[in-house]
Amino acid sequence: MSKTFAILKPDLVSCPPLALQALRQILSSKLRITRMALIEKADKSRLRQLYKEHEGRFYHNRLIRTMGSGPVLLMEMGVKESSSTVDPISEWRSMLGPSKLLKGYPEPESSSTLRWKYALSDVRNSAHGADSEASARRELAIFEDQLVPFDEKKLLEMLSLQNVEGSEDEDEGAENEV
């Protein structure tokens, strides 16, 4: 397959400067984003499909609620031609770090992972990644109709505009407060 599916979660994407830092780390890695979608709020029925394997676990509803709380960046990724022997799933999971926030603490190799840098908790852990080829296929199929060819310039503009638009909305709301 040579592809993986990844999501930058609302806790990261809702803070554009941090999302841009994470995106730069991805772009400078062995991975290549092939398709993407910046979604204002993910549809909860799609999220339930995505996290079906966690159904019945104590954190399932919190995970769905958190993932549907704000903007997400969906990404299909492969590897750069110069890294053709690299497995994109393993590479992405290595970049992510442990899903349990403190599991990798205080291991030095964990300090450069996306989750170590940006996670707020075990659920709000900044990013998602498929754990196998079968999962990557299944997860890509859930969001297939939303993914478009990757355009770095357009994505950087969208993330920057999101910051500006968010600031304006907040300013307008502040003026109307009594």
Image: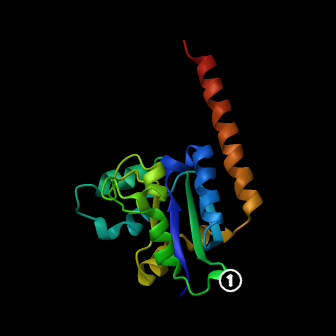
> In this orientation, which residue lies closer to the viewer: 128 or 116?
116
Q: Please tell me in which quadrant of the rendered image residue 64 appears.
A: bottom left
- Given residues 128 and 174, the one toward you in this image is 128
Residue reaching furthest front?
Answer: 108
Question: Can residue 163 be seen in this snapshot?
Answer: yes
> Outermost residue, top direction?
178
The number of numbered discs placed on residues in the rendered structure image is: 1
User: What amino acid type should be assigned to the residue bearing mark 1?
Assistant: Glu
- For the point 68% across and 31% down, which residue is it? 168
Coordinates of residue 6 in the picture (x, y in percent)? 51, 67
* Residue 176: % across, % down: 61, 18
- State left or right for residue 73 relative to residue 9: right
| Residue 141 visible within the image | no
Q: Residue furthest right?
A: 153
Q: Nearer the viewer, residue 177 or 76?
A: 76
Question: Label 1 belongs to which residue?
Answer: 81
Q: Is residue 113 positioned above or below 12 on the image? A: below
x and y percentages locating residue 101 in the rendered image: 35, 53
Above or below: residue 172 compared with residue 145: above
SS at mark 1 in the image: helix
Colour pattern: rainbow
Left or right: 2 in relation to 120: right
Q: Is residue 7 left or right of residue 47?
A: right
Is 26 above or below relative to 32?
above
* Mark 1 closeness class: few <14, some 14–19, many ≥20 residues within 10 Å: few
Q: Residue at x 71, y 54 (%)?
A: 156
For the point 42% across and 83% down, which residue is it? 134
Residue name at image x 64 percent, y 58 percent? 24
Give the quarter of the figure containing the C terminus: top right
